């Protein structure tokens, strides 16, 4: 048998080398160290309040668990729940929940959350039922700053609310539609004094009853 022609040998070696490069140890190492999405962690088991407690408002509405939901009764004027102790995270995180206005005509989810060392509140349904925005930005509440918008909320309907906090941005979505995209640089973040009882993490209402479910959070890489 004649020896293989040098050209064919070179081609064969090139094919083998390519296959090894695609499937060798280096490629396995790259795949093994690829970042995985952070998993969601529950903040409510559907049965007990856990680390949530009734907020320290002057006349907080009744807080109870029914049908796997947290029910917040009408306050005079405010009611809500607050996380006890240190919040799960202060930056590079997302928090999500579903909220429903069951009675009343004002905000049914005032989600107060940490932005580093400072608190901020996402208002859903304020000023008569439709105002949405962050409170406060540079001392201006949700009706007065650039995040202000309106959403037509219906009673007895669930809405999915999600907030993302990173060192550069605050973002928020309602039913997967982005409604806030605020760059933090150059802005002063704070809250209105009325929601101080919700710090560091809490959900409040104004003369309104609401239901909450599927509260969860996840860390961002």
Image (tube, rainbow, N blue to C red):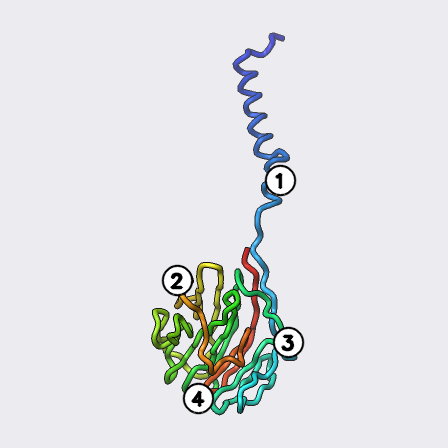
- Give the Cα separation between the discs numbered 4 and 2: 37 Å
Residue marked by disc 4: 104
Q: Residues within 10 Å of mark 1 (few under 14, many from 20)?
A: few
Q: Dot 1: what SS?
A: helix
Q: Dot 4: what SS?
A: loop
Q: How crowded is mark 3: few (under 14 residues within 10 Å), some or many (20 or more)?
A: few
Tell me the quarter of the image containing the N terminus.
top right
- Give the Cα separation between the discs numbered 2 and 1: 41 Å
Q: Residue 29 carries which label?
A: 1
Question: Measured along the vertical axis of the image, is residue 132 above or below residue 210?
Answer: above
Residue at 47%, 90% (x, y): give it.
77
Query: Which sits in the foreground, 107 or 55?
Result: 55
- Sooner in the amino-acid sequence: mark 1 or mark 4: 1
Question: Measured along the vertical axis of the image, is residue 7 above or below residue 85?
Answer: above
- Give the Cα separation between the discs numbered 3 and 1: 40 Å
The answer to whether residue 75 is left or right of residue 178 is right
Question: Measured along the vertical axis of the image, is residue 22 above or below residue 120?
Answer: above
- Sooner in the amino-acid sequence: mark 2 or mark 3: 3
Residue at 53%, 20% (x, y): give it.
11
The mark total stands at: 4
Mark 3 touching mark 1, by CB under 8 A? no
- Give the Cα separation between the discs numbered 2 and 3: 34 Å
Foreground tag (3 vs 4): 3
- Give the Cα separation between the discs numbered 3 and 4: 27 Å
Residue marked by disc 2: 186
- Residue 118: image x %, image y %? 50, 69
Q: How crowded is mark 4: few (under 14 residues within 10 Å), some or many (20 or more)?
A: some
Q: Quadrant of residue 68?
A: bottom right
Foreground tag (2 vs 3): 2
């Amino acid at each position: 048998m004649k020896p293989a022609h040098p050209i064919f040998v070179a081609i064969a070696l090139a094919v083998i080398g390519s296959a090894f490069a695609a499937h060798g140890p280096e490629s396995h190492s790259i795949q093994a160290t690829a970042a995985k999405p952070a998993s969601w962690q529950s903040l409510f088991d559907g049965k007990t309040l856990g680390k949530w407690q009734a907020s320290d408002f002057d006349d907080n509405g009744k807080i109870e668990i029914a049908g796997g939901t947290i029910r917040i009764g009408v306050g005079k004027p405010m009611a809500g729940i607050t996380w006890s102790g240190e919040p799960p995270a202060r930056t590079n995180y997302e928090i999500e929940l579903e909220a429903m206005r069951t009675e009343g005509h004002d905000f049914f989810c005032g989600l107060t959350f940490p932005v580093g060392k400072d608190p901020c509140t996402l208002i859903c349904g304020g000023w008569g039922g439709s105002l949405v925005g962050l409170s406060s930005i540079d001392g201006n509440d949700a009706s007065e700053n650039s995040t202000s918008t309106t959403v037509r909320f219906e009673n007895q309907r669930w809405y999915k609310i999600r907030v993302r906090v990173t060192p550069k941005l605050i973002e928020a979505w309602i039913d997967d539609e982005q409604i806030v995209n605020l760059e933090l640089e150059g802005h002063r973040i704070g809250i209105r004094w009325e929601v101080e009882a919700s710090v560091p993490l809490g959900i409040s209402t104004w003369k309104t009853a609401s239901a909450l479910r599927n509260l969860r959070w996840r860390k961002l890489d």
